[in-house]
Image: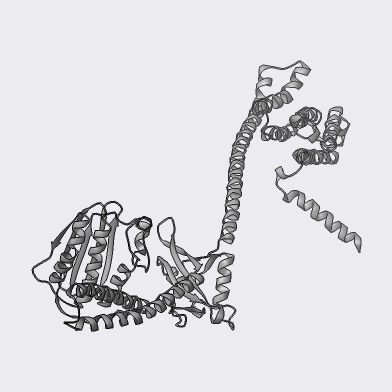
Amino acid sequence: MSTPTMWAVDDKKKLFIFKRSFHEHSLRMRVVLSQLPLSVCVCLSAILVWLFFPATLGNPFFLVFLLSQAFLLALCIAVPWHKLPFASFLVIPILDIVSIAFGREGGQEALTGLSVLVVLPVIWLCASGLYPRLAIALAFIGPLTIVWAPLFIRGTFTQQDLTKPLLFPILILGIGVSVSILTLSMVRQQRALEEKDAALKSALEVSTKQERLLNTVMEALPLGVVAVDGDGHDILMNRRQRQTHALATPPDNDDPNESQLLVFDTDRTTPLPSDRRPVRRAVLGERFTDQLVWLGSGAGQRAFTASARPMLDPAGNFAGSVVVFSDVTELVNALAAKDEFVANVSHEFRTPLTSILGYVELILDDPNGLDPKYRKQLDIVRRNAERLLSLVSDLLAVRSGQIAIQPHPVDVSELVRGSVASAEPRAAKAHVRLSVDVPGTLHARVDSSRISQVLDNLVSNAIKYSPDGGDVVVSAWEDEDHVYCKVSDTGMGIPLDEQAGVFTKFFRADGVRNSTIPGVGLGLPISKAIVEAHGGSITLQSEPGQGTTFTVKVPA
């Protein structure tokens, strides 16, 4: 049972030899394979002679031919060519040419055309790619020697005898030149392919290193990062994002789609619609920053901000998007605690302020019980107490997100002029030039006290943040549906990276925080809340060192 198996293994090995590329074999095997075609042809020639011309086997030249071929094949097999100088194996095809010369001389009466066998060692010489000029020379000289040598040995020949066999070496020369050219071309192609292969390996190594670096950076990031293709399939997700995804996965669903994930709005209870979910928005090609969502449920619920940037292919077409999730639970909780603290403190302020105002008004209601000098001082106390109470009310309103307004017909031009007039003493003290550009009348239905509060705050800020003097221009105009008020100054301006936070409660720019300019960072958030309560908007344009412009837009 074992014998057939062993033969099968040997057969596979033999087949494997022929399936491998020539250059993949050892040098000894390549030499043997190069000699093998000639050895096979010699064996066939010997068989033919033995069958049809047995007398030729007694010819000493033919016997030298056969024995030399057997010796050369044995030499190819036995010699460790890899231990010798690399080109040393070329001696074999040269000796083959000599051997074929003996075979032609000893067997031409039996088999004509034995000299054609010289094409095989010529092909070997020229196909080696070594010493191409010498190989081409031997491709002509070798066959020429085979056909001329017997003539010179006999000593009897004519010019025609020398000319007749010339076509044979010329033909072999042509074959040698063709083989040499093809070999050189293949060598150049092989070198080019090797260079490309080396370049590809180098590029692959660089790419692999960059991939490892990217994976290391991605895994080290404290942010969740997910990349999706144009069809919404995940193509990259780091460890933190896998944790985030697990947090949003429903307990009874191991493989949820985007619409099934536990993603909630800022109130922590309302599920976000599919088209408002961060990954879905990213797949639709949207670009957004810091969208606040809550993921998960129960005590483990966490707050995240999501930002997305689209990826484009070389043609500029949408090819996917990268979404970054940042855990901001502690920050959101801290802001909520701060708002709660402000609300509690404001409630505590309201009671004593109300009491102070009540008693001050009782005293001021007595026309005869108070010296005019003290009445004036109490008036100052009342105005400041009212201002504090109004500020407390605004803090509570901003915290709850509700500003109470009572719209009524108002001349906005008059409000602007009044705000500028009340600010003129402060402007004069700060060496700021105030100017007004408003029409004679500008009617709108707004809450006059609230809009005046906005104007007073914007004009006050324009003066406050022009510490070295300058110009402040307050203008107003209208179009078909809206009324606009603009306050422009030539003061210190706001850096671009800080402009997004100016309407945030308690925000103050770095340059202002380190100065002696007073403020708590509530004026602009309250003004924004008032304008938005009217259904309007307030926008900012600023450049450091050039000034700032606030534009208020409210429905007419």
Picture layout, residue 217 above or below residue 529: above
Q: Residue at x 70, y 32 (%)?
A: 125
Counting from the top left corner in percent of width and height, residue 550 is at 25, 63
Picture layout, residue 109 above or below residue 44: above
Residue sitting farthest toward the left: 440
Examine the image and state in which quarter residue 175 appears.
top right
| Image-based side of 428 in relation to 35, left or right | left
Counting from the top left corner in percent of width and height, residue 480 is at 15, 73
| Image-based side of 328 in relation to 72, left or right | left
Assign the N terminus to one quadrant of the image.
bottom right
Assign the C terminus to one quadrant of the image.
bottom left
Counting from the top left corner in percent of width and height, residue 232 is at 48, 70
Counting from the top left corner in percent of width and height, residue 153 is at 78, 18
Residue sitting farthest toward the top: 155
Q: Is residue 532 visible?
A: no
Q: Which residue is drawn at 21% across and 57% down?
A: 429
Picture layout, residue 532 above or below residue 58: below
Q: Is residue 418 visible?
A: yes
Could you say which is closer to the camera, residue 288 or residue 54?
288
